[in-house]
Amino acid sequence: MPRASENRFRNLPQGFGIKWLSRNSFTLGGYKFNIPSSLADLMFNAENVANSEPDSFYLGKEVEILQNYFGLFKQMSPKRILDLGVAMGGSAVFLQLAAKPQRLLALELSTTRADLLDRFIKNEQLTESLRVEHGVDQGDATRVRQLCDEHLGKGRTIDLVVDDASHLLGPTRTSFETVFPFITPGGSYIVEDFATLPIFLNPWLEKAAEHEGSRKLVEVALRQFLQEDHRPLHALAMEAILGSIADPGIINRVIVNRHWLRIVRGGKEIEDPDNFDLRAMAVDHFQLTQSSLIDSLTPYLS
Ligand SMILES: C[S@@+](CC[C@H](N)C(=O)[O-])C[C@H]1O[C@@H](n2cnc3c(N)ncnc32)[C@H](O)[C@@H]1O
């Protein structure tokens, strides 16, 4: 008979040695992780939670995202992983302990190294297999390619990419185009929280007419997730779908849910892998990817 305390967590992701302590914390491989309770908690409270327990890892992934990973790791065992946007280290440590890859490369724009992550690498004797590079922009194709070649190997060697970095369309597409040609057949490129903007906009816009606070939130969200061209990250899902229709040998399939965009690599070689152009794969006859801001949103950006 399962104990009552175990029953409480039966709907949370299970396997790979995870032990839930609450709905927002668990242990894995002897390390404690705290996770956000919701997307809003992730957006506005991450720093508080991350700093609240100095010896625990903060993993910026909601339960639903973890469900996706546990499902994925039951289907495939990625041997070579690229983690984009490692923050304070939680994602790299989680991927290391859950998937146990032979090689893991973690890249981060910030130049501040995470002491806890460095200690983890040393204690677990992972200095050869887990490489963390700071000060790397996911939009810097040359640097990303060079680091992948060095640590993950040349050619089609990468089984899994986890992109949780800028959440902006431009740099996200650049790193996708840089790395996707070098993913193994059946391997995946994942963009986490690719739809944060539309998820937030609907409820906030409804309240914005009456509440100044909600109005401010709409402004903050638009400024955080849009560049000058005003195109949102979720346009990438449409571009990938058009690509998969045009050539499933290259983009085998696109799997989308609220929390992630998973683009699965087909078996076909890309003719010029160093210059892969997602939008050139398919003519967008109906301008499905040519988004522009609807009039009602423009006042929030003025
Ligand atoms: C949401 S956090 C990542 C959380 C982490 N993956 C986790 O699950 O705990 C996003 C990180 O991406 C980094 N970032 C933002 N823009 C980036 C870029 N252009 N290239 C690389 N990293 C970037 C940020 O500095 C931040 O640390």
Image: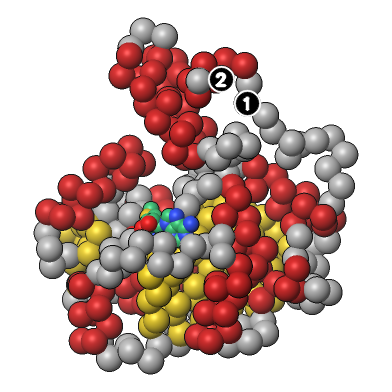
Residue at 79% across / 62% down in the picture? 248
Instruction: Look at the image and tell me in which quarter the N terminus lies.
Output: bottom left
Task: Tell me which corner region of the image, top left, top right, bottom left or bottom right, holds residue 262.
Answer: bottom right
Count all numbered tags in the image, as a single digit: 2
Mark 2: which amino acid? Thr
Q: Is residue 170 visible?
A: yes
Mark 1: which amino acid? Leu
Tag 1 near tag 2, CB within 8 Å: yes
- The label on residue 136 is none
Q: Position of residue 118 (x, y in %)?
A: 25, 78
Residue under label 2, please give it.
Answer: 298
Q: Residue 113 versus residue 156: which sits nearer the camera?
A: 113
**Colour logic:** secondary structure
Q: Position of residue 280 (x, y in %)?
A: 82, 55
The image shows residue 53, relative to residue 81, as above or below, that is above
Residue under label 1, please give it.
Answer: 293
Residue at 76% across / 60% down in the picture? 277
Q: Position of residue 76 (x, y in %)?
A: 54, 74
Left or right: residue 135 compared with residue 116? right
Residue at 39% across / 81% down in the picture? 131
Residue at 87% across / 47% down in the picture? 283
Q: Position of residue 218 (x, y in %)?
A: 43, 25
Mark 1 or mark 2: whose residue is earlier in sequence: 1
Left or right: residue 253 compared with residue 117? right
Q: Residue 133 versus residue 37: which sits nearer the camera?
A: 133
Judged from the image, the secondary structure of the residue bearing numbered disc 1 is loop
